[in-house]
Every structure is written in structure tokens, then in C-alpha cells.
Image (cartoon, helix red, strand yellow):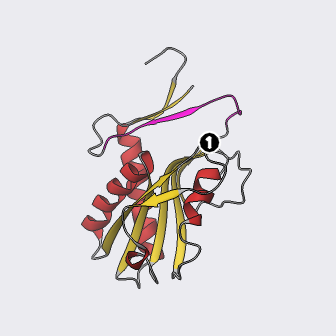
Amino acid sequence: MAGSQLLILDKKQIQQKINRIAYQILEDNLSEKEVVLAGIWDRGYKLALRLKKVLLKISDLKITMLKIELDRQNSKLVANTDLDETHWKNKVIILVDDVLNSGKTLAYGLGVFLNTPHKKIRTVVLVDRSHKIFPIATDYVGLELATVLKEHVDVVMDVEGEEDRVYLS
């Protein structure tokens, strides 16, 4: 990696954060039989897959995976999902992304669910940079990080976790 990058989370630390978040999700949903993990493509979805793996080990929850693809260049909400709304209707939805910066991506992700009844919606981010300009709250956070606006948080994550790293540049 380039010399201007600072490693802030390594593979082991990322897995510890994922494990802790999975237990928090379980504690918050003890009376539920099913939750929907809605990952924002692509790193949010990869994080959701990793959460699913841990949740299946520690609980009997049925996990429905939902992939949300957003058009981040559009000034209006343009989103596609790989499942129709019958898969998340009247269920607990957990929206997952890798980094929270301004809150726009999570706000757009939440927009997918606004016209469908649900039990509750929770949010997960691996890193919260605390630069919100949208009224978004995070329910489960791996790491809260105070950064300046010019800095960038880069999450490198594959589904199996072999190359997991979080850098600040």
C-alpha cells in the first residue's frame, strides 16, 4: 500500500468488530425468528454476508439477504434490489454499509423501505466518520473515527475475509 495510508483496522480487528455487531443484532432481536440483512452493494453487501455467517453460528435466526444497488451519481433515489418487497415486508430490516460519511448512501438505502410496512429498521456500519449532513443514526458501529473532510477511509474486504483491511489516507 502507498506510504500515505495508515492502517486503522487489520483482519483480526475487523472480525472482532463483525462478531460484536452480530451479538448486538442478536440481542436486539431475541424475540424475532427472521431478519433481513440489506447490504448496499458492494462492500456493504460483503459485510452483510460476513454478519450472516456469524449470526448463523450464534443463533437460530433465519437470515434473508438483500442486495441494494444505488445509483450514487443521481440526485434522486434510484435503487435496485435483488428481491421484491414481499421478502422484507413486516420484518426486521438491518441496512448494512461499510463507511458512514455524509449519510447520503444510508439515507438512499433507507428510501427503498419507506413504502413497505416493516417491524423496525436498524443500521450497521463498520466505520462511522461522523461527518453527517443527512439525519442518519447508526445503531451498530464497528469503529467511530474522527477524521477531517479531506481524509478518506478505504475498506478492503472480500467475502472470506482474507484481505480485510481498513486504511485512512
Residue with the mark numbered 1: 145
Prevailing secondary structure class for the magenta stretch in the rendered image: loop
- Number of disc labels: 1
Q: Quadrant of residue 60?
A: bottom left
x and y, in percent, of residue 141 in the image: 54, 55
Is 154 inside the magenta-drawn segment? yes
Residue at 35% x, 78% y: name it.
34
Left or right of 50: which side holds 136? right
Residue at 32% x, 65% y: name it.
55
The secondary element bearing badge 1 is classed as loop
Location of the C terminus by quadrant is: top right
x and y, in percent, of residue 28 in the image: 48, 75
Who is closer to the viewer here, 147 or 63? 63
Provide the residue span drawn in magenta. 147-158
Residue at 59% x, 65% y: name it.
111
Q: Residues within 10 Å of mark 1 (few under 14, many from 20)?
A: some
Q: Image height check: is 168 above or below 161?
A: above
x and y, in percent, of residue 43 in the image: 42, 45
Q: Residue furthest top?
A: 3
x and y, in percent, of residue 11 in the image: 36, 38
Residue at 67% x, 49% y: name it.
75
Three-letter residue code for mark 1? Leu
Who is closer to the viewer here, 116 or 29? 116
Location of the N terminus by quadrant is: top left
Is 3 inside the magenta-drawn segment? no
